[in-house]
Amino acid sequence: MPVLFIHGVPATSRLWQPILSRIDRQDEVLAPDLPGFTAEPPEGWVPVKESYVDWAIAQLEGLYERGGPVHLVGHDWGCLIALRAASLRPELLRSLAVGNAPIDPHWPLHNLWTEWMKPGLGEQISDALEGGQMMAPSLQRLGFPEDDAKHNAFEYPKSVHRIMSLYRSAVNVGTEWVDDLARIVIPTAFIWGENDLIVPTEIGRRMAGRIGAEFNTVPADHFWPYEAPDEAVAILKRLWKRTESRPHTILTQPPFGG
């Protein structure tokens, strides 16, 4: 069965290399860059959360047509996108594994998110961050390899401004998307860096409880694909083995009547 990996901010698809090097699958595996993060996005692209969810669903539909129900994995913003896609199109999925991003009405926005919300100031901060080099030392401290830290998503022209637009579109994501977590009816595992103070484990446990999902911590801060790939892969393989050992039930329509 195919697998789709979705990264977050300010990572690129490089984030998944430690995971991809440890899984052994004959099926199609995709780990694309999010549109507008490492290259110009498609013509007419509007960098808001709905666009990224629609993009993810299109990726899932293609994989489903070629190989059947998909294992979906998301981290950071990839977690948010994956959760939303799963709540809208569960029939495309075999399993879901996500972590370290909040869909919770009581989670306070982190500092950069708050600053990006302010007209004028957000643009000034984005101008300063463009090129990615200001982020590199912090990312290395959080587990990024040196080369990946230098080539983070903010490196690419105008990508940081598109990412700011994405965050601005999601200021109320906690209230807008939280109720729909209950629509996720596929086997789901949360993988959470136990030392993440930006989005602490308490948020992850509460999200997992809304879905009835298993919750796993790994010895990492925020970026567990870099910091704890062995532990993360063990969780993924266990989830995939469990879900692939039984027939897939094809949903004729979303269970919520959409």
Image: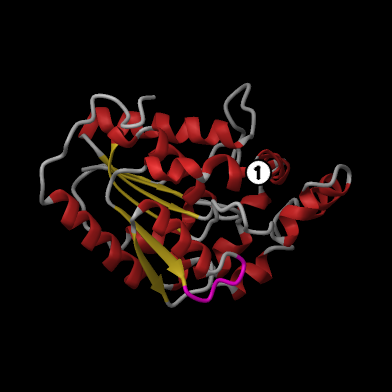
Identity, as a three-letter code, of the amino acid under mark 1: Asn
Q: Residue farthest to the top? A: 44
Left or right of 95? Residue 75 is right
Q: Mark 1 points at which residue?
A: 172
Image location of residue 80, percent across then percent down? 51, 47
Q: Residue at x 61, y 27 (%)?
A: 45
- Secondary structure of the residue carrying tag 1 is loop
Image location of residue 179, percent across then percent down? 49, 43
Image location of residue 162, percent across then percent down? 68, 39
Q: Residues within 10 Å of mark 1 (few under 14, many from 20)?
A: some
Left or right of 128? Residue 20 is left
Viewer-closest of 188 and 211: 211
Can residue 106 be seen?
yes
Q: Which quarter of the figure is the C terminus placed in?
A: top left
Relative to 43, does residue 136 appear above or below in the rendering?
Answer: below
Region in magenta: 194-198
**Quadrant position of residue 90:** top left
197 part of magenta stretch: yes
Viewer-closest of 194 and 31: 194
Relative to 223, does residue 46 appear above or below in the rendering?
Answer: above
Q: Which quarter of the figure is the N terminus placed in?
A: top left
Left or right of 6? Residue 36 is right
Q: Residue at x 62, y 51 (%)?
A: 153
Viewer-closest of 174 and 240: 174
**Quadrant position of residue 106:** bottom right
Relative to 123, does residue 203 appear above or below in the rendering?
Answer: below
158 part of magenta stretch: no
